[in-house]
Amino acid sequence: MGAHFLRGESLVYDWANRLSRGRYRDEAYRGGLWTFFTLSNGGFYMAPVYDNRMRVLNLMNGYDGFMGPDAFGITVTLFALCHLAELTQEDRIIEHYHALREFAAGHAEAAQIYRAID
């Protein structure tokens, strides 16, 4: 993300707060440590360092489900990249979005990720 790294990181945390709506404390995102992953296809994502699954609620498309921290990280990074692409109109950000979306297709929780973002 280069010059937009700090803005993008902030958007990841913002989307994590927007999408995680647990009825119980251990179901929701509560802040904390995140790990940054670089992908072989040029993409990247951030994921929270949690042990439990989180409830994800996307009011824009009606998705309501649970996913592990890695899938949650991919999901919120996709939302953040989409948001950042709208703000910057930079092709590079759009390419990162598509690289991560392609990676997500092979994830164990791909169906949940795609339901949450589509």
Image (cartoon, rainbow, N blue to C red):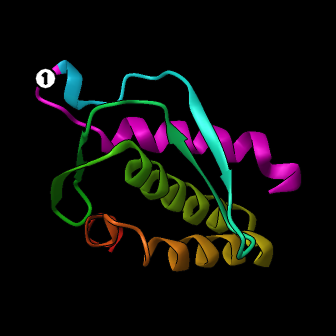
Task: Report the side of 25 relative to 69 (left or right).
Answer: left
Residue 57 within the segment the image draws in magenta: no
Residue type indicated by callout 1: Tyr
- Residue in the foreground of this view, choosing between 87 and 75: 75
Q: Position of residue 35 (x, y in %)?
A: 61, 38
Q: Position of residue 110 (x, y in %)?
A: 34, 70
**Which residues make up the magenta segment?**
1-24
Residue 39 at what x, y percent from top left?
A: 68, 65
The image shows residue 94, relative to residue 74, as above or below, that is: below
Q: Secondary structure at mark 1?
A: loop
Coordinates of residue 33 in the picture (x, y in percent):
55, 25
Magenta-colored segment: predominant secondary structure: helix
| Direction from residue 82 to residue 115 in the image, left or right | left
Q: Quadrant of residue 69?
A: top left
Residue, x 55% and y 54% (percent of image)? 80
Q: Is residue 91 left or right of residue 76?
A: right
